[in-house]
Every structure is written in structure tokens, then in C-alpha cells.
Amino acid sequence: MQTQGQMENDLGKVIIDTDVIATYAGSVAVECFGIVGMAAVNMKDGLVKLLKKEYLGHGIQVHYNDDSSISLDFHCIVSYGVSISAVASNLRETVKYKVEEFTGLTVDSINVYVEGVRVID
């Protein structure tokens, strides 16, 4: 039997916190071509800030669905001059594969919100 974020068998339960999934997904995402980093959006000011590597999980929301699958929302900054659709597609495929392999949970959907573009030196 599986409920939100937990797997159970005859030996016991494994519960995975959403912060663990978000941090892992963020570390996978920044390795993808064209992704500069995760973004934090200040709703009050409308300002976007590039997050440091220690805070990658803050730019990602993890939602548990009723069927024990998860959905991820990425707020990211992409490199200038790359195809945003290609970067988003690569991000979705890579993160879906690695997060499913890491957690044992099914990734139902990945939403990519491009919050900014940065020139990389």
C-alpha cells in the first residue's frame, strides 16, 4: 500500500519528505544543458533572484497526487541564446527519469516556469 510520499512493505515504512525530493530534483536540473539555476520569485516586488546551490530546492514545489504520484513545479533561469522548448523538454525527461529512479515514486507531471534569462560568460 502507498500513500502520499510513503512506501510500505512487510519490513516497515519509508517516508520521503518533499524537501528531499525538491533538493534532489534541483541538483539534477542544474546539470541539464541551458539551465543556469533555480529562481526564487518575490511575489510582493515581482523580483526574481537566482538561488545559490545550497538552496536549489526553494525554486521547486513538490505536490503529492491522490494516486501516490508526484508533480513538480520548477522555477528556473535559462541561458541566453538557447531554445527554451528544448531546454524544458530535456529538463522534464532527465528529472522524471532520475527522480523516479531515486524515490521509487511515479512523476506524473513537471511544469517548467522560466523566470528569467542570463548571459553566461
Image: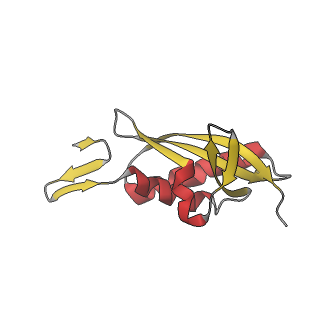
Is 55 situated above or below 91?
below
Residue 66, position in %: x, y? Answer: 34, 32
The figure's colour scheme reads secondary structure
**Residue reaching furthest to the front:** 44
Whole-percent x and y of residue 114? 70, 43
Please give left or right for residue 81 compared with residue 73 in the image: right
Residue for point 71% across, 51% down: 77
Q: Quadrant of the C terminus?
A: bottom right
Q: Quadrant of residue 32?
A: bottom right
Q: Is residue 33 left or right of residue 108?
A: right
In the picture as drawn, the residue positioned furthest to the left comes out as: 10
Q: Toward the viewer: 76 or 98? A: 76
Name above or below for residue 71 compared with residue 104. Answer: above
Q: In the image, is 45 to the left or to the right of 111?
A: right
Count all numbered tags in the image, as a single digit: 0
Residue at the top extreme of this rendering: 66
Quadrant where the N terminus is found in the figure:
top left
* 53 over 57 or under it: above or below: below
Q: Name the residue rendered at 62%, 37% in the picture.
A: 43
Image coordinates for residue 28, horizontal then vertical, percent: 57, 60
* Along the line of sight, the residue nearer the viewer: 67 or 111: 111
Residue at 53 percent across and 52 percent down: it is 58
Regarding residue 98, the answer to whether it shows in the image is: no
Res. 8 in view: yes
